[in-house]
DNA sequence: GAGTGGTCTAGACCACTGA
DNA sequence: CAGTGGTCTAGACCACTCA
């Protein structure tokens, strides 16, 4: 046993860096403050820029930093709690005008959830969810034409007022229940743009299935910015897990 | 206007790669199949290995791939749905023996949630949640000594049977309600080890606050593997969003 | 135009797995 | 042991923001 067994688990540099910088954020920086640029930071810590970036990426993933091309890296405010509680017998978007209709087809995964064939007509309405002035989520609601038969005669398939018609038709149905799942995803190009992020940014995907009369009457897919959002269920908007 | 405005948005190579490989996974590979190694793949696509890795990282984040050092990259099975539904008036771990007591202090963020001072005694019990043979989550339950006064006299602070005592004491309290939040995090070293992942792996952190008699009687912090898990709420374990 | 973060390269070495 | 993914380097160029 002449060899030393200590240090047998050499911590990766980027991991150590993340810890050091994370602690510095708590003590030496205020929310919104700009950090030194990546080249300076890398030089200061004596690592390559790529290594430094790996540490910053982690911190950004955890919502501790915010990086913007052409601007710099700033200390992020605590994540905002976004209420996604169930309200177990309400259709979405009742009376709100933040929704607008879009003219696109439902992806295969959604048609599967809706339990319909890919060629059935599906209304698609979209909204951008905004909290405290910041866009936090892009939500798409898929409603098979079968679910809202009263709408079949009307025109203007892609119009902006159309969304309200679809939603108000939904209200006429009896909502038997809903179920929901949350998983990690990466932002598609269009969602990323609306959320002011780069494509591939980490997002929390909330998929909700609305059940009526024994079948799936609608499906909602909401894409939340994972870096800035904390999804809350129940009556606790003040639940905070900072640091 | 002599310059061509086409291709004004050059898609990053890694993004394009991700799309191409992702499609190939659907058509040319079966679940569990091993992909060519990274050096071969990079050469085949004519990119540097780092760029190829960036694409694979994205796919792994989305739960489409699984990479293991020393082994290779395999096609991941669809994410497993893990039920985290509220069961709005039940304490955790009733009668189960999967929990064991650990001898550690509550982090500052938890003491804040519990609304106690950092020096108050807190019982900590832990469990590893397993679904379909795979570890999917590490859960820590923090119970202030004040919440379970009947336990004060007993000994063996770090023992394994202690956990059951703490949990059964909890059952005696009236549970008024609970609230919950979900956010993205990165696995701490100890959690990562139990979840069979590297430190920093993306996880979904589910924080639950148990309310009794107007105060927070306990707090649970559950860390789910984000790559393999889909958190489900409600009665739909079969809700699937593959591909 | 200067300065920022984002992408990409071509290489090196390390830690781990399994035959 | 050979082969895998994980870490790290030192550079280059690009896209973007803002004064």
Image (cartoon, coloured by chain):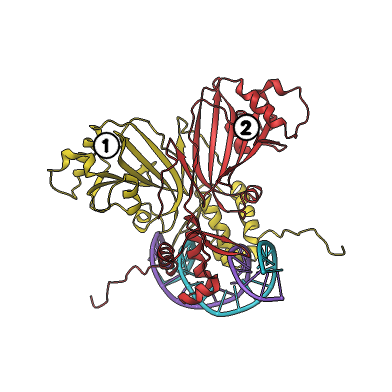
Chain colours: A red, B yellow, C purple, D cyan
**Left or right for C11, reference C13:** right
Quarter of the view holding residue B171? top left
User: Mark 1 — residue?
Assistant: B96
Residue lying at 54% horizontally and 31% vertically, measured from the top left: A209
Residue lying at 43% horizontally and 66% vertically, measured from the top left: A28
**Which quadrant is the C terminus of chain A positioned in?**
bottom left
Front residue (pair B59, A230): A230
Label 1 crowd (10 A; few <14 / some 14-19 / many >=20): few
Q: Is residue D8 shown above or below B145?
A: below
Q: Residue most toward the right?
A: B2
Front residue (pair B208, A3): B208
**Left or right for A226, reference B6:** left
Residue lying at 52% horizontally and 51% vertically, measured from the top left: A228
Q: Estimate the x, y position of residue A44 in percent, counting from the top left.
A: 48, 76
Label 2 crowd (10 A; few <14 / some 14-19 / many >=20): few
Q: Estimate the x, y position of residue D13 in percent, counting from the top left.
A: 69, 73
The answer to whether marks 1 and 2 mark residues whose Cβ atoms lie closer than 8 Å is no
Chain letter behind tag 1: B
Checking the image for residue A115, the label placed there is none
Front residue (pair B38, C6): C6
Q: Estimate the x, y position of residue A5 in percent, counting from the top left.
A: 27, 72
User: Mark 2 — residue?
Assistant: A96
Q: Is residue A166 shown above or below A129?
A: above
Classify mark 2: helix, strand or loop. Answer: loop
Q: Are marks 1 and 2 on the same chain?
A: no
Quarter of the view holding residue B169? top left
Q: Estimate the x, y position of residue B42 in percent, counting from the top left.
A: 60, 64
What's the CA distance linking mark 1 and mark 2? 45 Å
Quarter of the view holding residue A128? top right
> Would residue B216 be seen by someone viewing this image from the given angle?
yes
**Which quadrant is the N terminus of chain A positioned in?**
bottom left
Chain letter behind tag 2: A
């Amino acid at each position: 046993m002449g060899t030393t067994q200590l240090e047998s688990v050499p911590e990766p540099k980027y991991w150590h860096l993340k810890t050091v910088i994370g602690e510095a954020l708590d003590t030496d920086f205020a929310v919104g403050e700009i950090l030194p640029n990546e080249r300076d930071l890398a030089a200061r810590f004596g690592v390559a820029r790529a290594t430094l970036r790996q540490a910053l990426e982690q911190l950004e993933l955890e919502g501790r930093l915010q990086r913007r091309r052409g601007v710099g890296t700033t200390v992020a405010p605590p994540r905002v709690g976004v209420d996604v509680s169930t309200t177990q017998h309400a259709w979405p978007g009742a009376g709100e005008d933040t929704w607008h209709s879009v003219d696109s087809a439902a992806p295969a995964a959604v048609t599967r959830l809706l339990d319909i064939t890919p060629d059935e007509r599906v209304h698609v309405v979209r909204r951008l969810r905004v909290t405290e002035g910041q866009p936090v989520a892009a939500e798409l609601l898929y409603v098979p034409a079968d679910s809202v038969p009263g709408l079949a005669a009307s025109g203007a398939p892609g119009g902006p007022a159309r969304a309200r018609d679809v939603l108000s038709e939904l209200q006429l149905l009896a909502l038997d229940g809903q179920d929901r799942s949350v998983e990690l995803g990466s932002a598609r190009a269009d969602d990323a743009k609306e959320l002011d992020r780069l494509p591939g940014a980490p997002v929390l995907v909330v998929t909700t299935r609305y059940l009526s009369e024994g079948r799936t009457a609608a499906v909602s897919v909401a894409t939340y910015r994972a870096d800035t959002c904390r999804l809350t269920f129940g009556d606790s908007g003040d639940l905070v897990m900072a640091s």
